[in-house]
Amino acid sequence: MNVEDPARRKSRLEDLQAATALGAQDRTLTVALERMVEFCSKTVGADFGALEIADESADASGRFIAVDAANGSPARLPGASAANADADRIAGGRLSLNVPIRAQDIIYAHLRLSRHEGSPGFTPRDEALVASFAELAGLAIDNAWRRRHWLRISLNLTRDLPAAPEGEAGLIVQHALAASGADLVLLASPASDDSGPRCRAVAGPHAASGDWPNLAINPGPLQQALEMDTPLLCAAADLLNSGGEGLAAAVIAPVNRHSPNPGLLILCRSAEADQFPPVDVDMTGVFCEHVSLALELAQGQRSREQLMLFTDRDRIARDLNDLVIQRLFAAGLEMQSLRRFTPDETVQRRITDLTAAVDDIIRQVRDSIYALSPDPDVQESLSARIVRVVHEATSTSGCVPHLQFEGLVDSALLGPAGRHLLAVLTEGLNNAVHHSRAQTISICVSATDDLISLTIDDDGRGVTVPGNSGRLGTLEQQARALDATLTVSSNPGQGTHLRWEAPAAANNRRTRPR
């Protein structure tokens, strides 16, 4: 009876464990397969090993990943002629093994191993070990394909999101469905102070069987997922209080975790389907990171476009008022002055009619100017409103404002704290421009996970800091009601420093801007 040496057996097991870890962790398929061929050749004592790509749909079809164990040198052989030489070397040897590697029910490659003539033959243990390596290689290939599939769909979503601001939630769940193959995909909002979690969008074969807008979702797993750095895998029954019949496993990952209005992507599979493999759980988190980045970029792009639109409207309105209306008004006065040059009633009536026509044109132009004002039903981002306030307060003063944003200011909802920030900004700029006579004003707005702050510094002559009276005193009292603080320091001839800050939680209520 042939008994294997225990030390050699232990070494083989360690090599198999190392190959398992490599196949699970290495994201570069070619490198992972190359190292697996090295491990396999070393473990079974082969003098030469090669992996021949057999899948016709693969980019590397007909190519070799070869390892000369005698020299310890791996080499990728791109040409068919070079590959055929090694194929002949293996096939011509009497001591050779040829094991197919399957991925997603197709033969992707052949693992070929050989020993020199005169060496002992491969044992059944060697053959079993090579078969295990082939299964690991198939798993590595399948994982690489799954990752590539997820990444391709994530890139498509990054491209499509900016063009669909009104249908972002629907796009996210549709792309997540295509990437994961889940039976149900939900995009939910976590519980707020006055309501439970709500479903924003749904997709999948199981979506037709429930009243998803009124779906009862258990807030516990959602809150747990928001606090984790990796996606949460749980049972669908623990997550969905109703509508989850026939579903087994669920994966939850946060979207825009650090914004005041985060979302949670939920993937569910039915009890009859395969459970989520680790690569799908991992790539769900990567997908949500891409979604978060795409949403921030889309919001930034829309804010820039909105700011450009407001700036253009303001320029047009100013030109109409300064150029067109003033000249029309002057023309009307000139026509009125013609009355004294003629007593003819017909001419007088004609002058009156023309003057009335000019007045009507002026009214129509003014109506057009008012129509160019921002639509009150369109919710601007906080940064866009800040820019507009700064522009309106300083455009006619001759001073130079320096505006700086830090953090995710645009992700903040325009709630009570946001409106109070705008009021403080307006009053601070009014004091700097009209009372302090500043030439340079520095404004910094910062937003973190816990705090929203505003700082205004100017180089003016300073202002009298009120106690509990005046507009600043009123704003200070309002700040205390929001758990915010407002401090103003000013010395004659040395400018003014204003600091306002509020906890981010004070701004997370869903309110429409006034």
Image (spheres, rainbow, N blue to C red):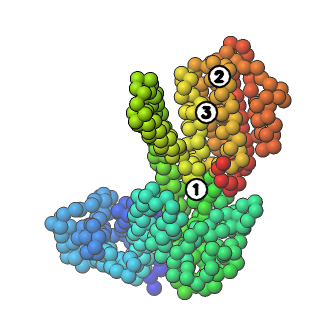
Front residue of 300 and 17: 300
Mark 3 vs mark 1: in front: 3
Please, which residue is most extreme toward the front here? 344
- The quadrant in which residue 201 appears is bottom right
Q: Amino acid at mark 2?
A: His
Mark 2 vs mark 1: in front: 2
Q: Residues within 10 Å of mark 2 (few under 14, many from 20)?
A: few
Q: Position of residue 308 (x, y in %)?
A: 45, 42
Mark 3 vs mark 2: in front: 2
Q: Position of residue 79 (x, y in %)?
A: 18, 63
**Count of residue discs:** 3
Can you identify the residue that label 1 sits on?
256
Local secondary structure at mark 1: loop
Q: Residue at x 37, y 78 (%)?
A: 102
Q: Earlier in the sequence, mark 2 or mark 1?
A: 1
Q: Disc number at residue 434?
A: 2
Front residue of 186 and 431: 431
Q: Is residue 445 visible?
A: yes
Can you identify the residue that label 3 sits on?
444
Q: Compared to 470, does 66 lie above or below?
A: below
Question: Is 1 on the left or on the right of 206, as rendered?
Answer: left
